[in-house]
Amino acid sequence: DAGVIQSPRHEVTEMGQEVTLRCKPISGHNSLFWYRQTMMRGLELLIYFNNNVPIDDSGMPEDRFSAKMPNASFSTLKIQPSEPRDSAVYFCASSSAGWNTGELFFGEGSRLTVL
Amino acid sequence: DQQVKQNSPSLSVQEGRISILNCDYTNSMFDYFLWYKKYPAEGPTFLISISSIKDKNEDGRFTVFLNKSAKHLSLHIVPSQPGDSAVYFCASRNQAGTALIFGKGTTLSVSS
């Protein structure tokens, strides 16, 4: 069974460039999350979708960040323009309907470096 | 302000001994707690969880204890093995069930 698939695994870009991170959740999962990991702040929730609808985007740091989920099998996180402080590992996670377990399934992450 | 705190960035133990990882939370409305394990270059993976109506949950070598009055939970690993070396994240789910809130993580190193 395929897990959560993220691309690219690594991205190095220059300040001011647009960055697009992609995520394919586990088939059948109806909730999708974007998290960011940094040394200073640990794992932070950026945005959460349920049935393709954004439910909570209070963690999105600035207007430079945007996320979309056009269908149940694809989501993007876009940063435009990117800045060096955006350098982090970005994780996508998905979960199935219901919160009885609370378990999220994470992808392997996209490591972003902004020079 | 952090709602889930892991105050020890790192922990080192010898193989065969007990590892105890600690976590504190601030919101008494949290109803479900989880531990995740993360190896380098991989995503976090679910390890064990506990509901707020319980004070202990055990799964093999892993046991999670919850002290609601102290807003504290701990993960015990007995016996510790070198393969347990990883970053461990504590997470809480709020009652709205909208998300998991993670601590900063504790890096466990188990030496043989």
Image (cartoon, coloured by chain):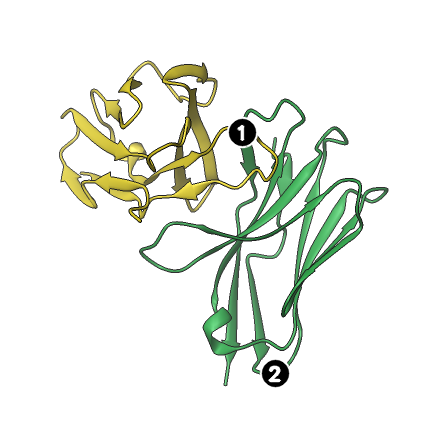
Chain colours: A yellow, B green
Q: Quadrant of residue B58?
A: bottom right
Q: Residue at x 65, y 43 (%)?
A: B33
Q: Are marks 2 and 1 on the same chain?
A: yes
Whether residue A112 is visible: no
Residue at which label 2 appears: B16
Residue A9 place in picture, x, y as percent: 21, 46
Q: Label 1 is found on which chain of the structure?
A: B
Q: Which mark is residue A27?
A: none
Specify whether B54 is left or right of A32: right
Residue at which label 1 appears: B99
Disc 2 crowd rating (10 Å Cα; few below 14, some 14-19, many 20+) is some
Furthest residue toward right = B69
Specify whether B14 is left or right of A81: right
Residue B107 place in picture, x, y as percent: 51, 61
The disc, 2 or 1, on the residue closer to the chain's N-terminal end is 2
Q: Looking at numbered disc 1 in the image, what kind of residue is underneath it?
A: Ala
In which quadrant of the rendered image does the N terminus of chain B lie? top right
Q: Quadrant of residue A83?
A: top left
Residue B66 place in picture, x, y as percent: 77, 50
- Secondary structure category for the residue under label 1: loop
Q: Looking at numbered disc 2 in the image, what kind of residue is underneath it?
A: Gly
Q: Quadrant of residue B69?
A: top right
Whether residue B98 is visible: yes
Q: Label 2 is found on which chain of the structure?
A: B
Q: Residue at x 72, y 50 (%)?
A: B73
Q: Residue at x 79, y 46 (%)?
A: B54
Q: CA distance from mark 2 to mark 1?
A: 35 Å
